[in-house]
Image: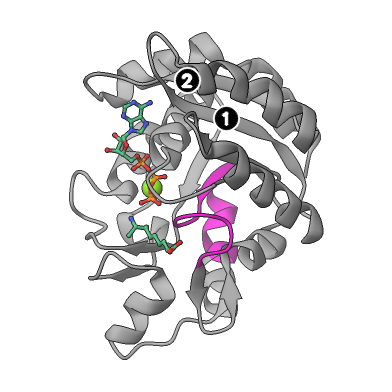
Amino acid sequence: MKGFFITGTDTDVGKTLISSGLAAIFKEKNMDIGVYKPLLSGASRYHPNSDTSLLKEMAQTKLSNASITPFQFKEPLAPYVAAKLEGRSIYLEDVVAHWKKIQKKHDYFIVEGAGGISVPLGEDFLVSHLIQELQLPIIIVARSDLGTFNHTFLTVQYAKEMKLNIAGIIINGIDDPPNLAEKTNPNLIESFCKVPILGILPKMQVVDAQDFKQIIKDNIDTASLIHQMQQNG
Ligand SMILES: Nc1ncnc2c1ncn2[C@@H]1O[C@H](COP(=O)(O)OP(=O)(O)OP(=O)(O)O)[C@@H](O)[C@H]1O
Ligand SMILES: C[C@H](N)[C@H](N)CCCCCC(=O)O
Ligand SMILES: [Mg+2]
């Protein structure tokens, strides 16, 4: 399977906005793109603002909300914990079984995890283990401000230890004008992590997914991402 797994240094770093924007850009290029956000906590997959709905709408896929997100949980917690509170147990093989069903429906996929790369998703697995199963290259979404170096470095080291294929890092939410940490972080991250920065995205005053798609186009070499997707798999 070809595509990207969008992970991050934390929850709320912009994975969904970036995943849905990238999916919309690939769709515009006539690519047959699907989305998968297997575990959603703290929202209903049918709510118009849920990760699931935004991904589906931007990718313009016919996949149902239930197949994009087979597992949903009420509480806004790590999926493993949210599942436990409902007396449920989720196993990696269940998530992979759903993936095997939907992956036949599109040529390319954007997959979003939940929170950061080591968040517990189920009984026996973290986000990183799901990535190993899906065998997709990862894009790491990181914050822009002070403190992000440490989170990003640790995420990259862990991803390397887990033998994941890292396509690059997207730094999201830079201020206008950028503060001193935001100005110096990209070079610092690139030189110590030895992973390419794919783009630096500004903080939006009013968040709109279509406008964000344009921001991605303006700041990320999406043609090169498409090329990478076509080569992989
Ligand atoms: N560049 C940005 N400018 C302004 N707001 C942003 C930006 N990126 C993300 N946001 C906002 O930050 C919030 C978190 O973004 P998003 O839902 O994409 O995070 P996430 O990493 O997918 O979180 P989760 O781990 O819950 O899936 C959202 O309200 C989103 O609109
Ligand atoms: C509910 C939230 N929006 C995420 N999907 C889940 C985030 C779990 C984070 C767990 C942690 O790193 O402490
Ligand atoms: Mg999200």
Horizontally, residue 206 falls left or right of residue 28, namely left
Residue 221 visible? The answer is yes
Residue 5 visible? The answer is no
Q: Residue at x 21, y 21 (%)?
A: 206
Point out the stretch of residues depicted in magenta. 99-119
**Disc 2 Cβ-to-ligand 1 distance below 8 Å:** yes
Residue position for label 2: 201
Residue 25 lies, with reference to residue 115, above or below; the image says: above
Residue position for label 1: 170
Residue type at mark 2 is: Leu
Residue 91 lies, with reference to residue 184, above or below; the image says: below
Q: Depth check: 203 or 183 in front?
A: 183
> How far across and down, in percent of the image, does residue 165 sit?
77, 47
> How far across and down, in percent of the image, does residue 7 sit?
55, 48
User: Which residue reaches farthest left?
Assistant: 47
Q: Residue at x 39, y 67 (%)?
A: 70
Helix, strand or loop at disc 2?
Answer: strand
Horizontally, residue 178 falls left or right of residue 7, namely left
Q: Residue at x 60, y 41 (%)?
A: 140
